[in-house]
Image (cartoon, rainbow, N blue to C red):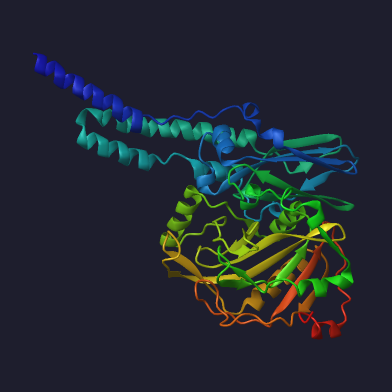
Amino acid sequence: MLKHRSINRGWITLLVLSLSFNGCVTYRPQPADRVPFMERAQTQTQDALTVTVAVLSDKEAKKVFGVNLAKKGVQPVWVKIENRGKIPFVFIPRNMDPNYYSAEEAAYMAHFKQGKQFLESGVIAVIFFPLIALIPVNFFAARHANGKMDDLFGKLALSSNIVMPDSGQSGFVFTSVDEGTKHVKVDMIGNDGHRIFNFAVTVPGIKPDYTTKDFENRYQDEAIVKYEEEDIPRALATLPRCTTNKKGTAHGDPFNFVVVGELEDLITIFTSAGWDETQALTFGSGFNMAKAFITGDSDRYSPVSPLYHNGHPQDLALQKSRSTINQRLHLRLWYTPARFRGKPAWIGAISRDIGVKFTWKSWYLTTHRIDPNIDDARDYLLADLIEIEKVKRFGFATIAKPLPMPRTNLTGDPYTTDGKLLVMELSTEDTPLAAFGWDRSLSKTLGKN
């Protein structure tokens, strides 16, 4: 008798555990007003139009919509448009994201798959026959949850793209996932033309590498050096030609560009041109990077291995990855004490990763192989920033100081270069392009003083 009761208790325990880990489908989204994403909302006004946007983080989206939308590649952006004018305006969602999702499409992508629920419940039922009741329960629970999901997505979505006079619209637009800094473009068109609202929004989630740096206390006031335009080429000649390892005993990638601008402006401008921020190197980000190396998947924000200048690893890294982590453009920047027109100068190194190779020099046993033609990456950067009209002036300084031989980086990859440094002064406003007025004869004397 006792043995029989013990067996029954065992089956009950198994049933409870199975229901706990694989039981009925539950769908419990939270009311949007209980999730504090609106604390990060940004607002802009042009004429009679006022636009407010807020971007949900992965965790916030999961709370509001009850499912992991980020896993499906979907990121909700809350938009509020107020029209106090006398003419209607139309919102163009494809100019926010050419691949945006309709509310119905986003909900369908997030659905609990009834076939998957049937299969999982069936496997459990084969092992524990009394749990066969899970099959119809999970099937209909998933169906019910999906119906609620469809209703919620439709209710929370931006209901109309047309904003009539003296009215407003608000709701979510379902865009592709961006982490770090996300650029949100709200394009409104009326019979008198476009009103374009550009927002740079910080999305909680990743920890960019530059957020771990103390720029404010890096240099004492007496270390700051102010330069005029005519001083720049000669000042560049005093810089080292290459990055180094941590001990400063071996040469790495050569420096091939300098950019002038505040940190916040650099982040906004580069990310608006499609460059992604880089995560600080932690165990978690390193593990994700190693996994991406093995699987060949993309990791838009993967850490960049450290190179050194004056004993400091790079202060800021940015990248443009392809569909695989093995191929990407990436650049490193170091904060310097030089100031031009009151703004800091950053010295940088840019190259293109074209594959991976085995190495004992990293704990994840792989490293990137670079394209030997590093000038192509440098010139790509110039064209990239010119295209978005954020380069105020640019020039090339020919440095007579020779590059070290052999011309290889720290992992033995060879490179070729004309040895010129690209210098760019950035502008936060769209600006006509101009060149620095350096005399070509200066290149003959650089590096000889």
Q: How many marks?
A: 0
**Residue 238 occupies which quadrant of the picture?**
bottom right
Residue 125 in view (yes/no): yes
Tell which of 105 and 266 is nearer to you: 266
User: At 42% from the left edge and 68% from the top edge, which residue is drawn?
Assistant: 359
Quadrant containing the C terminus is: bottom right
In the rendered image, the vertical position of residue 177 relative to residue 431, given as above or below: above
Quadrant containing the N terminus is: top left
**Where's residue 415, x and y in %?**
58, 79
Does residue 341 appear left or right of residue 355 in this picture?
right
**Where's residue 94, x and y in %?**
69, 53
Tell which of 19 and 105 is nearer to you: 19
**Where's residue 124, x and y in %?**
26, 36
**Residue 337 occupies which quadrant of the picture?**
bottom right
**Residue 343 occupies which quadrant of the picture?**
bottom right
Does residue 112 appear left or right of residue 213 in this picture?
left
User: At 79% from the left edge and 57% from the top edge, which residue is drawn?
Assistant: 223
User: At 59% from the left edge and 47% from the top edge, which residue is drawn?
Assistant: 207
Tell which of 125 and 352 is nearer to you: 352
